[in-house]
Amino acid sequence: MPTLEFKGKQFVYSHHLGVPFRELQVVSEKSLPIDGGQPSLDDNLIIHGDNLEALKALLPTHAGKVDCIFIDPPYNTGEEGWCYNDNVRSPLMQEWLKNSANPVDKEDLERHDKWLCMMWPRLNLLHELLHENGSIWITLDDNEQHRIRVVLDEIFGEDNFVANIAWQARTSVQNDTDISTNNVNHIIVYAKNRRKTNRRLKQSNADSWYTQDGFVVRPLELDTGRYDNPDDDPRGPWKADPFDAPNVRENLDYEIVNPNTNTVYQPSKGRHWRTEEEKYLELLEDERIVFGKTGKAGPQLKVFASEKEDYGEVETSWWDGPATTTDGVKELNRIIPDHSFDNPKPTELLKKIIRHATDDQALILDSFAGSGTTAQAVLAQNKIDGGNRRFILVECEDYADTLTAERVRRVIGGYPFSGNQREELHRENITWTAFSNERRRQKIMEHIQSLEKLHGDNYDRIRKEIKDGELIVRGERKVEKVAPGLGGSFTYCTLGEPIDIASLLTGTGMPSFDALARYVFYTATGQSLHTVENPAANGFIGETDLFRVHLFYQPDKDWLRSNEAALNMERMAAIEATNNSGKRSIVFAVAKFMSQKELTARRIEFCQLPYAVHRILGD
């Protein structure tokens, strides 16, 4: 597979592995917990800090658990003022980046190399955080989209490429160039593990999202307007599909005779029939084969709407909606009038991505959070369908509190606003032809009525319209003083000092028990520890399919220097007695009072703090 070489790649190739772990520190006064509750790391999160270090901080708790990643990184236009200053330790890299405090601009002939150096370790960490059936959606323009595709092929695998969606970001035309290119942005989609079959997700089985064979895009409603029943077939409306398919297979190459005209047909050059001859004869007997409207054409297969309804329609890679960046600007201006943020993404775009990529219990991560559109989209979609999706936002800039988190606070609790407010409740592809189909129209009206019943009290009017091939249902209301909130909560965090195991015995920069437990569990097993209970007498903190992990630790230098911190005979016996599974036990402590030979006989592996914290999976 071709790979992309760029300056600095050899130095950043494994840089994500050396990024120090930092503890997420809750900032209570900037958080917005549920009424009567306390800020919690199990809630929605807004993290202020460098996104490379924040992603590393999330690994012990969220590795393999994020269902959908959306990022809107710098487009590297040369006018954005971003700086590349990752602390890569290579002297050659440091010499190259000695002026890294200066923004990357159009005069920087190495700006593409720096951008790729910035993205590489972040994409590697995002890949590690992603669920096996999850997906990543990246918005870019033509400055870097072609380069990121090659990088994503290398990190995610070219077989996991899903689509390069062309999104109409603007309706205005750029007049100072040969061809206007500012209208379209790219949404590049990759899966962690793309499905290995051609079968799409059943709509009726949407609750079983992760039982599928890899990532699938949630389909659109079936457009039954393309189905008809001219011969009054009792099986209902149908459409004629070609009976041939691409490629050549000998067992699918045979003669078909039109019984009406005795004309003999062979597959066209480079194609074959879609079934073996025996199956074809069964379909013919079952009156599933038609020969055009007049009966004088080549074979076609009857496909009934009832067979396709559960699987819906395939989404296309051209999105001329649901909103533009202009809509995003107007939306943010309504919420925070005095902001100074350029080109925020519209909420409706993120809602569409969320609907396609996740179920209603998903965890969505945005590590280039900007103005906080992703959080608003998650909250809005939860409000519409009663979901329990969660978000994690990471923002490194100083406006993480005053803009990103403030926007989320306002959309949760309501914000000052006077005027007309419209919120999209439903959107699907449809035509007037489809709407004229009685069965399809009845189904649509039933869905609209359910939306009206669910949301009618929140709006003055529920408006329905078919425009440009789409049915759009919006709630409209006149707001006098305060726009109503969406509800929800979040915890605001910053990044603490690096978890420096070597400093434990000095008593400086000592991590909490929870933070160290998550750290050692992840480094030992490669898996995240979701919850940390109060430390047990035997130090047990969690287990995997292969290991049980124990930690004896208190953030107290005097305790760590005492015999209480060591693995002794009593603790060894307790660990052995509670290991009913026969798994290997991994024990972290500052000292032990027995030989490793004695521990090995009891299937116990001792890892000394602070020196022996290491990944031992497979040792």
Image: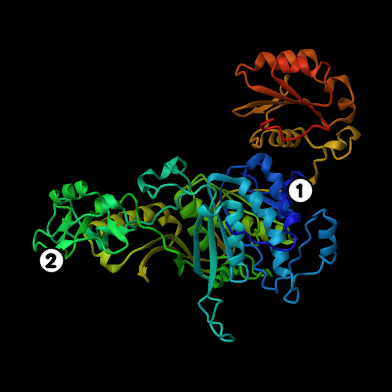
Q: Position of residue 316 (x, y in %)?
A: 42, 63
Hey, which quadrant is residue 459 in on the image?
bottom left
Query: Along the polypeptide, which appears first: circle 1 or circle 2?
Result: 1
Q: Quadrant of the N terminus?
A: bottom right
Crowd class of label 2 (few under 14; some 14 to 19; many from 20; radius 10 Å): some
Q: How is the image coloured?
A: rainbow
Instruction: Report if residue 452 is visible in the image.
Output: yes
Amino acid carrying mark 1 in the image: Val
Of residue 169 and residue 189, the one placed in the foreground of this image is 189
Which residue has dot 1 on it?
19
Pinpoint residue 290: horizontal percent, then vertical percent: 16, 59
Q: Is residue 375 visible?
A: no
In front here: 323 or 522?
A: 522
Q: CA distance from mark 1 to mark 2?
A: 70 Å
Q: Position of residue 308 (x, y in %)?
A: 29, 52
11 lies left or right of 227 = right
Residue in the picture at 69% in, 49% down: 55
Q: Which residue is mark 2?
A: 296
* Residue pictured at 68% horizontal, 62% vertical: 5
State if disc 2 and disc 1 touch (CB < 8 Å).
no
Q: Which image quarter is the C terminus in?
A: top right
SS at circle 2: loop
